[in-house]
């Protein structure tokens, strides 16, 4: 039974028991309203407040023994245009337009200070006259928290932008003298300087090229994070790109006496639309890791297949030491080299981060499965 039905029955049967029931219902309703955590205010079409609960008095700092002013003294954006002409001149929100809508805005307390509120207004009819009920919540703390969050996000984005610019600038600054070192080393290599000196020049070149590779990776990451990565897709034969990437790691594959098993026969004529340079960069990173973290005389399985949805799956599986399940969520985080405190690990720890970004730019996904002691399997899925 609703309150309206309850009260109508009581008024139709004005017995002593019914009167007591009416009093109890009114007390119950009054207790519910006054103990509500939301502010509740009822007012007429002129804005005169009829009832106000404790929560609403707290929101607007209205003393319990004080008669509240009209509703628009506290919520000034609500206006009461008497006709269409007045409605056009209304500087706030016409009352009828707020009905049933959840609205946010500033409100004025009894002392004149502001508070942020969220409110909704509904209309009821009592004895043929319109009255309105506003349900109000103080959202000042929430708005402060939102503002703090926006500011923190802005600061974080600015810090990220500054970091990317710094990495980009430093990479360029480092590459300039390094290119000179490599250039002069190559000139020295053209002359016979004796066995020891020739070996020393070779070491300089190897170290310089390794350092240049690391610098280029940092530069790539900064470009990707700042959204300035170069990407020029074209139709190319997939197997050709894969074998070109394999040839680039041949020296380190031979050095560790690793065998590569190929499963490429079904895709020998498969074409893919991608940036050849960026695709080979992904493959080179994954193949290099498959060698770097593999055991001596281990194996690498390279498998390519076209899926039913025409997407292309590329799997690179190694027989290395594997990755613990608890570390898999960190594998694509920049500069996180996992077991570098236990094992000697070369590199910056951003190769897989770059791979993930490049795969996402290509519209694909990258996934890893691994088991300690049994190796890892990286799967790249790209649109066909």
Image (cartoon, rainbow, N blue to C red):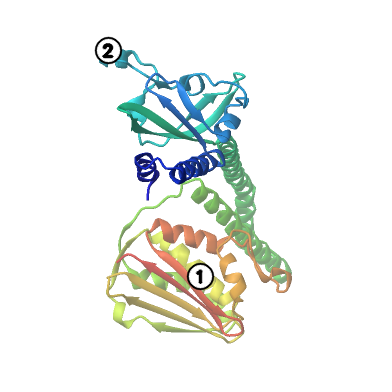
- The numbered disc on residue 85 is 2
Towards the viewer: 69 or 165: 69
Count of marks overlaid on the render = 2
Asked if residue 76 can be seen in this view, the reply is no
Residue 199, numbered circle: none
- In the displayed structure, 256 sits above or below 220; it is below
Q: Earlier in the sequence, mark 1 or mark 2?
A: 2
Report helix, strand or loop for mark 1.
Answer: helix
Q: Residues within 10 Å of mark 1 (few under 14, many from 20)?
A: many
Measured from the top left, where is residue 132 in percent x and y? Answer: 39, 30
List x then y, in percent, for residue 214: 60, 58
Q: Residue at x 40, y 40 (%)?
A: 14
Residue 353, image quadrant: bottom right
Which quadrant does the C terminus fall into?
Answer: bottom left
Relative to residue 212, is residue 315 drawn left or right?
left
Whole-number angstrom distance, CA of label 1 to CA of label 2? 72 Å
* Residue matched to label 1: 286
Q: Nearer the viewer, residue 88 or 269?
A: 88
Q: Determine whether label 1 and label 2 are within 8 Å by CB.
A: no
Q: Is residue 208 above or below residue 138?
A: below
Secondary-structure class at tag 2: helix
């Amino acid at each position: 039974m609703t309150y309206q039905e309850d009260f109508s029955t009581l008024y139709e049967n004005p017995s002593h028991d019914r009167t007591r029931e009416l009093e109890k219902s009114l007390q119950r309703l009054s207790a519910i309203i006054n103990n509500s955590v939301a502010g509740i205010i009822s007012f007429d079409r002129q804005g005169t407040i009829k009832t106000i609960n404790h929560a609403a008095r707290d929101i607007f700092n209205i003393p319990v023994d004080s008669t509240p002013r009209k509703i628009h003294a506290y919520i000034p954006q609500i206006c009461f245009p008497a006709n269409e002409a007045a409605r056009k001149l209304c500087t706030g929100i016409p009352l009828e337009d707020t009905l049933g809508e959840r609205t946010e805005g500033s409100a004025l307390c009894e002392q004149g200070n502001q508070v942020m509120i969220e409110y909704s207004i509904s209309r009821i009819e009592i004895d043929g006259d319109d009255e309105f009920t506003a349900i109000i919540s103080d959202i000042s703390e929430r708005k402060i928290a939102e503002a703090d969050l926006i500011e923190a996000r802005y600061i974080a984005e600015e810090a990220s932008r500054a970091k990317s610019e710094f990495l980009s600038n430093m990479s360029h600054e480092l590459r300039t003298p390094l290119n000179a070192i490599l250039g002069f080393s190559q000139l020295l290599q053209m002359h016979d300087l004796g066995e020891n000196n020739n070996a020393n020049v070779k070491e300089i070149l190897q170290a310089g090229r390794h350092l240049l590779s690391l610098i280029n990776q940092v530069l790539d990451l900064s470009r990707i994070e700042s959204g300035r990565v170069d990407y020029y897709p074209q139709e190319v034969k997939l197997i050709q790109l894969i074998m070109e990437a394999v040839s680039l790691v041949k020296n380190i594959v031979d050095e560790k006496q690793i065998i590569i098993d190929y499963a490429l026969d079904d895709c020998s004529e498969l074409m893919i639309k991608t940036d050849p340079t960026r695709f080979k960069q992904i493959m080179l990173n994954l193949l290099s890791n498959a060698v770097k973290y593999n055991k001596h005389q281990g194996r690498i399985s390279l498998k390519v297949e076209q899926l039913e949805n025409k997407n292309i799956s590329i799997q690179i599986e190694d027989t290395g030491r594997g990755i613990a399940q608890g570390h898999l969520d960190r594998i694509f985080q920049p500069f996180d080299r996992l077991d570098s405190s236990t094992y000697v690990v070369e590199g910056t720890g951003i190769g897989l981060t770059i791979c993930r970004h490049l795969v996402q730019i290509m519209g694909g996904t990258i996934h890893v499965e691994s088991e300690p002691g049994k190796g890892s399997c990286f799967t790249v899925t790209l649109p066909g």
